[in-house]
Amino acid sequence: MSCESRQTDPPERRPDIVALVMAAGVSRRFGSDKRRARLDDGQTLLETTLATVAQVYSRCRLITRQDDDIEWALHASSGQGELQRWVAAQAGNGLGGSLGDAFRHLIAQDDPAIAAAVVLADMPWLSATTCAQLNCHAHSEHIVIPSHQGKRGHPVLFGRRFWPALAELQGGDGARSVVQSNPQAVKIIDVDDLGIWRDVDTPQDLQEPM
């Protein structure tokens, strides 16, 4: 089935791609744990993101801090696929630290996936259809990045070839250095979904219209 036809079909779950939901931030700008913030339908922000991910990926790893009380999210998401919590020891060093921990876990467990989809937990408006569209381009040698109106976003799919470089991350704001070092591998996919870059940093972000 072509990528074009899949855009209009129900999302297909890809067991050969593992999802890493990055949820180890401290919500400083939000003022409280934004993962627990309620959306209009009553679901929490994190529950909504996990539900979207479960539609497309049969395996999900939720990346959190060691001291997180996160059992509520795991309980709410039970039955939606294989969900495991992984602790990021370097979460205090920023997203880059958490990513480094996550990819070291993947390599240590010899995960068989051809790619890992890095999903930010505070992007509850991301469409499962968009994720499925990106999955069409997943490859062990590719870095797949969505773009909407000329602006890049998430999730980003990192092929297996780049996991060792990602596992070396110790801190910083993400995997930008890995992307910039491998321009030949980057595949930019245009999508009709502003959810790829609409995140939640403050309570006011929850009130902004789509």
Image (cartoon, rainbow, N blue to C red):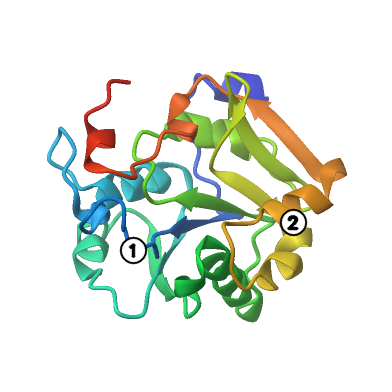
First along the sequence among labels 1 and 2 = 1
The amino acid type found where label 2 is placed reads Val
What residue type is disc 1 on? Val
Residue 54 locus on image (x, y percent): 39, 48
Looking at the rendered image, the quarter that the C terminus falls into is: top left
Residue drawn at x 83%, y 43% is: 183
Residue at 70% over, 73% down: 168
Q: Using a 10 Å C-alpha cutoff, classify the residue at mark 1 as few (fewer than 14 neighbours), some (14 to 19) or many (20 or more).
A: some
Residue 105: name its quadrant: bottom right
Using residue 119 as the reference point, say whether residue 111 is left or right of it. Answer: right
Q: Return the residue at label 2.
A: 178
User: Which residue is at a point 39% across and 60% down the rendered structure image?
Assistant: 23
x%, y% of residue 55? 40, 42
Q: Secondary structure at mark 2?
A: helix
State the CA–CA distance, disc 1 to disc 2.
24 Å
Helix, strand or loop at mark 1: loop
Residue at the left extreme? 42
Q: Is residue 158 left or right of residue 140?
A: left
Mark number for residue 26? 1
Image quarter (top left, top right, bottom left or bottom right) of the N terminus: top right
Vertical comparison of 130 with 96: above or below:
above
Q: Quadrant of residue 99?
A: bottom right
Mark 1 vs mark 2, foreground winner is 1
* Depth order, front residue of 139/184: 184
- Residue 37 location in percent, x, y? 19, 48
